[in-house]
């Protein structure tokens, strides 16, 4: 038996744009506790976990979107072949608004899923999972639907690897009850010692249901977005434990959603966004 503890705090900086006259900076704190069972001479193992997320907007005018999320889950695994692992997972959560006057609905999402991770050859890996989820929202639209995921990874050289995957997911949303996402994502990583180059493009076909409207003029209840995003970066490894990083992220969101802003004006919230990040990564 062993015990796992993981806690991180993230401050997301997002400047004011044409959709709002104030910054939408957010503070997110994530905590995960796990009790892990891994017997030395058994093919069975697994873990029980508790996860907590607190998501708060720094501007009081945006407090209607503040929320706290809890989730408990059980994840047993079975290694029935030397390089093949099967697993199931059952989890139940609670998502609750922090603002007493919030327009956001609380929910109690249930997830049941199973999957297989295997090594088909020394260079080819496959991960597949599927399951069922239900949102149990207290008001407005909810979801009761399948979840599907698959990823193929190929090591095309000793220093390079490529992955391609698809996921169908349902997630709680800050600007709606929830969103359904078809995600196609890829990644390429290549090492030119001491440099590591990587690129991670992804496409989302996203639909929001139960859209929260904060303006006096109502918009539609459903929103459909097409999202393209890619991250490209270069990391320089000074030593095995410290590296400098430069990442560029491009995001493009095209949406069919239109919201009246008063005075006959209509807002199209489609946008493109560029981010350049410099940092250091240290292993201690």
Image: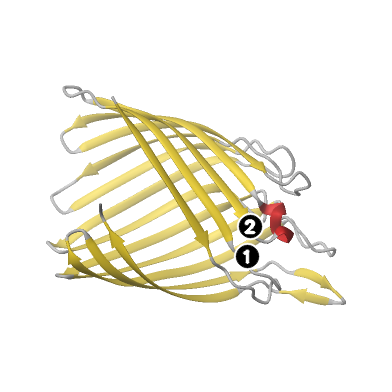
Q: In the depicted view, which residue is nearer to us: 49 or 253?
A: 49
Question: Dot 1, crowdedness within 10 Å: few (<14), some or many (≥20)?
Answer: some
**In front: 60, or 135?**
60
| Vertical position of residue 161 compared to residue 72: above or below | below
Whether the residues at callouts 2 and 1 have beta carbons within 8 Å, the answer is yes
- Residue 57: assigned label: 2
In whole angstroms, how far apart are the C-alphas of marks 2 and 1? 7 Å
Left or right: residue 191 versus residue 114 is: left
Q: Position of residue 201 (x, y in %)?
A: 39, 67
Q: Which residue is mark 1?
A: 24
Helix, strand or loop at mark 1: loop
- Residue at 62%, 42% (x, y): give it: 143
Residue 209 placed where, x, y %? 67, 52
Judge left or right: residue 233 versus residue 20: left
SS class, disc 2: strand
The foreground one among 237 and 130 is: 237
Q: Which mark is first along the chain, 1 or 2?
A: 1
| Res. 198 image quadrant | bottom left
Seen from the viewer's position, the closer of residues 212 and 283 is 283
Q: Residue at x 15, y 48 (%)?
A: 121
Quarter of the image with the N terminus is top left
Q: Is residue 4 left or right of residue 32?
A: left
């Amino acid at each position: 038996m062993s015990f796992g503890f993981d806690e991180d705090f993230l401050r997301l900086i997002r400047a004011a744009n044409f959709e709002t006259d104030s910054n939408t900076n957010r503070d997110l704190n994530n905590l995960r506790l796990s009790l892990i069972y891994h017997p030395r001479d058994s093919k069975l193992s697994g873990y029980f976990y508790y996860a907590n997320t607190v998501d708060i907007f720094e501007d009081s005018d945006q407090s209607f979107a503040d929320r706290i999320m809890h989730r408990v889950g059980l994840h047993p695994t079975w290694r029935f072949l030397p390089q093949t692992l099967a697993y199931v997972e059952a989890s139940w959560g609670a998502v609750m608004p922090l603002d007493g006057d919030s327009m956001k609905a609380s929910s109690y999402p249930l997830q049941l899923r199973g999957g297989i991770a295997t090594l088909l050859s020394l260079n080819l890996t496959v991960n597949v999972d599927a399951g069922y989820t239900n949102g149990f929202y207290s008001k407005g639209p909810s979801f009761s639907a399948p979840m599907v995921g698959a990823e193929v990874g190929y090591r095309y050289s000793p220093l390079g690897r490529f992955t391609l995957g698809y996921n169908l997911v349902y997630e709680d949303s800050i600007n709606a009850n929830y969103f359904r996402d078809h995600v196609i994502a890829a990644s390429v990583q290549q090492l030119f010692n001491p440099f590591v180059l990587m690129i991670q493009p992804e496409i989302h076909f996203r639909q929001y249901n139960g859209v929260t409207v904060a303006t006096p003029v109502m918009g539609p209840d459903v929103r459909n977005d097409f999202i393209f995003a890619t991250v490209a970066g270069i990391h320089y490894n000074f030593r095995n434990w410290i590296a400098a990083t430069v990442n560029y992220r491009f995001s493009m969101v095209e949406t069919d959603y239109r919201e009246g802003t008063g005075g006959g004006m209509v807002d199209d919230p489609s946008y493109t966004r560029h981010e350049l990040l410099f940092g250091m990564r240290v292993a201690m």
